[in-house]
Amino acid sequence: MKLTPPSYLMLGLVRLGASSGYAIKQAADVSTRFFWPTSLAQVYPQLAQLEAAGLLSRSDDPHGSRRRSAYQLTDAGHEALSSWLRSPRKGTTQFRDEGILRLFSADALPLAEQLALVRALRERARRTSARMREQIVPLADTLASSGNRYPALVARLGADTYAYVERWLTRLEGELERGRAGRPGWMLDELAHAGAENLDAHHVARYDAKEDADARAEVALLERLGLTPESVVLEIGPGTGQFTLAVAPVCARVIAVDISEPMLARLHANTSRLGIHNVEAVRAGFLSYEHTGPPVDFVYSRYALHHLPDFWKALALARLRATLRTGGVMRLSDVVYDFSPADAAHRIEAWCATAGHSVEGEWSRAELEEHVRDEHSTFAWLLEPMIRSSGFQILDAEHSDDGIFAKYVLRAV
Ligand SMILES: C[S@@+](CC[C@H](N)C(=O)[O-])C[C@H]1O[C@@H](n2cnc3c(N)ncnc32)[C@H](O)[C@@H]1O
């Protein structure tokens, strides 16, 4: 018998304990099919041939009234599998994906539809990566106790590959959006800096359980600072909208600007559920939101500005100042480090040590580490001059005792 890759696939799965044709199909569906599609029609003839060649042994394994065969690797089967694994041949890569085939011909579409296609493919990559990470990897991990760690490693390769494809398509989406808006090539891609978690529907769904934005107290503060039922509020980075939902009933209108589609979808679901009609949700960012109409009375932004590197923070602040009437108020809260560089390591370490263990109802250590490593929270002694240079007066600055969080009240001058 001439052995082919499907033969080795059978031998490999039988070796891992999938002993019947049915079990092999089930196992292939959650493992090898991601890189080597197999049809059920191939499985039984292959098993019969491998048995005839002496590479598998078969015994009867009836299930109730149903006849079933159980297969095991013979010594010759082990030998065949090992020599294939040791052979110099690496095989060819076969990659078939209709989505990518459509992308290949996407120049035939107008820009808006190219963008829609890229978004759909990005969303598909996100879902596949999440499924692999949440279902396939843990399943493969259960094999580790029997000394088989490579199925889980290959599953991780799959999850990481799709995560990379998602990031790549996110970048492309940003480029296409910039092209559509006629923005220059040197402009920051805000979507690529939005924080992968904010574009992840699972994270968005559990966000409110992890974070309490203290919205009532924040609204009360704005009321003390002059917010009235006639005020217009511009909020940047509202996320799920904890503050938005609290402020909307006591002001004329809220313009809620966020770069993340899943966050805006959640915000929209929340406003619909509560029957709130004076929130205008806009998909844009600090650097791309184009304000029309009279300047607003208040700007609000909590835990969002750190997504921009410092140069862009200054530009964002100047743009926000331009949308705010002179004398208007901006409330800005964020992770802002109030210590010197020499103290950074122990202050950051102390903050990370406060983290919880899971990502469900709390911020995990990995999430805090990622914030410090990959996002752009900066020192107070850098941010505060930027705030002033952008046309604001700092009326109040409140720094948390651990030097990690800052809340500002700013007046447009
Ligand atoms: C940590 S969440 C904060 C949500 C909410 N403000 C709160 O306090 O709970 C950060 C939000 O900023 C948004 N964001 C990230 N980069 C942004 C940008 N460049 N422009 C506007 N929003 C952005 C994210 O999509 C996300 O909704």
Image: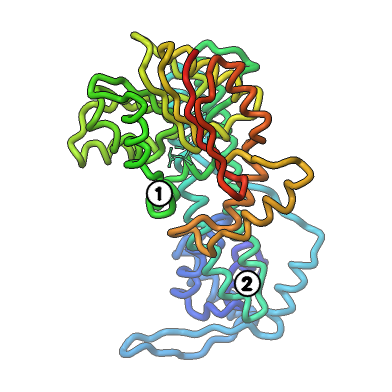
Residue plotted at (35% across, 30% down):
222
Which badge, 1 or 2, is on the more N-terminal residue?
2
Q: CA distance from mark 1 to mark 2?
A: 50 Å
Residue 166 at x, y percent in the picture? 54, 40
Farthest right residue in view: 88
Q: Residue 32, can we see it? A: yes
Q: Residue 117, can we see it? A: no
Residue 298, image quadrant: top left
- Depth-wise, is mark 1 or mark 2 nearer the camera? 1
Residue plotted at (50% across, 26% down):
395
171 horizontally vs 112: left or right: right
Disc 2 packing (10 Å; few <14; some 14–19; many ≥20): some
Residue 242 at x, y percent in the picture? 34, 41
Residue 350, image quadrant: bottom right
Q: Name the residue tied to disc 1.
A: 212
In the picture, the disc for residue 12 is: 2
269 horizontally vs 62: left or right: left
- The image shows residue 373, relative to residue 306, as above or below, that is below
- The image shows residue 44, relative to residue 279, as above or below, that is below
